Image: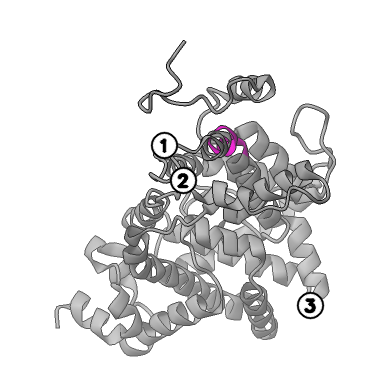
Amino acid sequence: MADQDDPGESIDPFAGMPLFGDLSRALSGQGPLNWDAARQFAVLAANGGGLLSGTGVSTSSNVDPTIRFKYRELADIARLHVADVMQLEVPATEPDVATPEQWAQQTLEAYRPLFNDLATSLGSTDDLPAEMATDPMAQMMAGLGKMMAPAMMGMSVGSMVGNLARRAFGVYDLPIPRATPALVLVPANIDAFAAAWSIELDEMRLWVLAHELAGLTLFSVDHIADHLRSLVQRHVGGFRPDPSALSDKLTSLDMDQGDPMAAMQQAFGDPEVLLGAVRSSEQMALEPELDAAVAVTIGVIDWVVDAVAVRVIGGSALQIAEAARRRRAEASPDEIFVERLLGIRLGAEQTARGKAFVQGVVDRAGEHGLDPLFNDPAAVPTPNEIEAPGLWIARVSGD
């Protein structure tokens, strides 16, 4: 038996607690993120329930095949105009359709390496502050937090993606490049939005196709996709977890009133517990560059969509653009969570910055003024150039 008075001997926080010991063993070896929990919670959030028992697969029916054919027919029209506006070859990827539940599961898988990096970063510390190192309760809470972290991450990431799936039109609502190009549309969300704004359905479909094809084409440019992907990876790798955050949250709960287990469940479901005081100086230093990359991405895609919509939709283009602008400005809690986890700041401010940069370039250099961005890896705009497109034009043109 170890000498309990020996300060160099570590204390087992779960000694004499078989329940926690069994749970710890059950959860061991699952990696930094519990993907079964992520899939289950993604589907639950996407449809509010309805799982096939034990499978994590949605019970909702697939999209009518005739809708898929309709999107492919309209995509042929949108593709020609996107290629003409961007002066780039549009990838031949055929549009597919999905239910919100299917979109959520596909998105989880598409960004699996990124979410794994995030979970690893958030759980990267084993060290307790000096004042907690000899406190058995603090050690137990820290051990419990470490044990539960993969499940908490799975639940949080799954819920975030599932709730995004209830609003998403397609892949590029979340402007992060995927390793495998994709063009997946969510007809249920598109139809509901069109009905809410009294937009003719085929016009709404064409607008969404223009948006998705513009995003697909932009991220087919390797240096643009690699730049943004690298920034997001650096952001998720920059978390510096506060090992006392979970303990502080749990010890502040009033366990003497009501149901203690309910209080524990509420604490573990709180995103602030997951994130803790984690924002690092590295992430703050990275923010201007990441914001600039996101603003340019949004600005270029919106500029292409506006140009295509005027051609193929006509008078309704402005109505759809205004409705889409309002939709983007109404950030949901899950979109704010995306911002904090992945560093992707969306919303009115970023939209305005991106639009002002792109329009400033086009006004000064003509409709092909963005060509250097598409063709030259050194032409990625800096944060200062986003605010002054004339500076960017001068740099890339050699003036």
Q: Residue furthest bottom?
A: 363
Q: Which is more N-terminal, label 2 or label 1?
A: 1
Instruction: Please state which of residues 29 and 139 is positioned toward the viewer in this rendering.
Output: 139
For the residue labelled by badge 2, is the local secondary structure a helix, a strand or a loop? loop
Residue range in magenta is: 145-151
Front of the two marks 1 and 3: 1
Q: Does any portion of residue 182 appear in the rendered image?
A: yes
**In this figure, which residue is indicated by the disc labeled 3?**
197
Asked where in the image residue 19 lies, by quadrant, the reply is top right
Where 329 sits versus 248, above or below? below
Instruction: Please state which of residues 94 and 103 is positioned toward the viewer in this rendering.
Output: 103
Q: CA distance from mark 1 to mark 3?
A: 51 Å
**In this figure, which residue is indicated by the disc labeled 2?**
243
**Location of the C terminus (image quadrant):** bottom left
Asked whether residue 149 is drawn in magenta, I would say yes
**In this figure, which residue is indicated by the disc labeled 1?**
126
Secondary structure mostly seen in magenta is helix
Bin the neighbour count of mark 3 within 10 Å (Cα to Cα): few under 14, some 14-19, many 20 and up: few
> Callout 2, which amino acid?
Pro
Question: Could you say which disc has been placed on residue 90 in the image?
Answer: none
- How far across and down, in percent of the image, does residue 273 sit? 58, 51
- How far across and down, in percent of the image, does residue 193 sit? 76, 69
For the residue labelled by badge 3, is the local secondary structure a helix, a strand or a loop? loop
Q: CA distance from mark 3 to mark 2?
A: 47 Å
